[in-house]
Image (cartoon, rainbow, N blue to C red):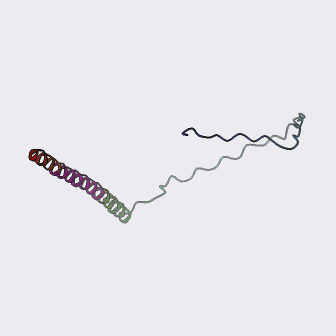
Amino acid sequence: MFRPKLPTMPQPTGTVTPTAVIEPTTITPGTPTTPPAPVAPAQSRPVVQLTPGTVLALVGGGTAVVLVVGAVLVSMLLAVAITGASVAVCAVVLRSLLTADAKRR
């Protein structure tokens, strides 16, 4: 009942073609090519220039990311704390109900 049923592999149908025979070919040497001329190096200039405006935007964006991630983490911690407190309250209520029921008997 719990064993999987594996399908059987279908057998090939039709005619099977024989494999083709590959004959070796001769290698003829080509004409030698000259190496390319060396390329002049580009100027060593930074790709992105940091102006005071871009630095301010980067700092503001980084601050916003840190604040958002911090708010998410604090809210998750608060959710775990509230869940733990509610489970503890439920446990105390159930314990008092069970002990009160045992004392009545």
Indicate left or right for 58 with 10 as reference. Answer: left
* On-image quarter of the N terminus: top right
75 and 25: which one is in front?
75
* On-image quarter of the C terminus: top left
Residue 43 % position (x, y): 53, 53
Stretch of the chain drawn in magenta: 70-93
Instruction: Determine whether 82 is above or below 17 in the image.
Output: below
73 part of magenta stretch: yes
61 and 68: which one is in front?
68
Quarter of the image for residue 58 reads bottom left
Q: Residue at x 26, y 55 (%)?
A: 79
47 and 94: which one is in front?
94
Residue 10 % position (x, y): 75, 42
Residue 22 % position (x, y): 88, 35
Task: Kindly report the secondary structure that dominates the magenta region of the rendered protein.
Answer: helix
Q: What residue occupies the far left of the structure in this picture?
A: 103
